[in-house]
Amino acid sequence: MNSAKKATESSRQFDDEPPLDLNEALGVVAEAEKRARRELRGNGAWVYLLWALTWFLGFGTLHGSRNGWIPVEPSTALVLFGLLVAAGVGATIVIFGRQSRGIRGHSTFIGGFYALAWILGFAVMGVLSSAIGVAVEGFWLRGMLINGIAILIVGLLYITGGTTFNDVVQVVMGVWFLVVDIASIIAGPEHFLTVFFIFGSGGFFVGAAVQALRQRRGPVNA
């Protein structure tokens, strides 16, 4: 008798509970998705600014050596550029490594293979660069071809990353880098460094500013 009474009271309690609000549930899911996307993306403004400075200093040194307004030999400028790029890669790995701590599941799968695509892409670029170095005699023509391949990889992977992580800024930057790459090849060995120096690093500076503004808007517009 007591058992039947308790079952009846429990049933009444469930009946008294308000029905599940589907819109509210969808809102919770959407907010969780936005939060996860922000965690995956991290502070993209700092990463863009890092590469803006890397390209500005690196291509600027090569450009200055090419045109004689920096007293540095082209081979030395190339070594300095390589060191700057290596430092930028190391800093980027540290930044993304810290922000991806605690992220598991499908997000780890996506991020891992996206990183692998960068590694394999530039491994292919390294092999092609060696072949170009053997086949092409002109120092600046070699530089134009090797950089053209590198920026092609960067542009395509930026577009891929932007579409994968739903980041419009990254997609636009990928398209911009491909346009800059085309312009640099059209400019030829004499002026390709000018294009990369001004419009390549400039694209990163603009991307950093836009990303910073997006992140300042907070969770609603993330």
Image (spheres, grey):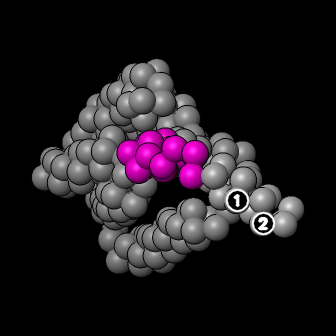
List the single residue furthest toward the left: 186
Q: Position of residue 162 (x, y in %)?
A: 36, 53
Whether residue 85 is situated above or below residue 206 in the rendered picture: below
Mark 1, Cα crowd under 10 Å, few <14 / some 14-19 / many 20+, is few
Q: Position of residue 45 (x, y in %)?
A: 48, 31
Seen from the viewer's position, the closer of residues 221 and 85 is: 221
Residue at image point 49% right, 70% down: 117
Q: Is residue 52 left or right of residue 14?
A: left
Residue bearing mark 2: 4
Seen from the viewer's position, the closer of residues 206 and 2 is: 2
Residue at image point 57% right, 68% down: 106
Element under disc 2: helix
Residue at image point 42% right, 55% down: 165
The tag on residue 50 is none
Residue bearing mark 1: 8
List the single residue furthest toward the front: 1
Location of residue 144 (image quadrant)? bottom left
Seen from the viewer's position, the closer of residues 73 and 36 is: 36
Pointers 1 and 2 in contact (CB under 8 A)? yes
Q: Position of residue 195 (x, y in %)?
A: 25, 39
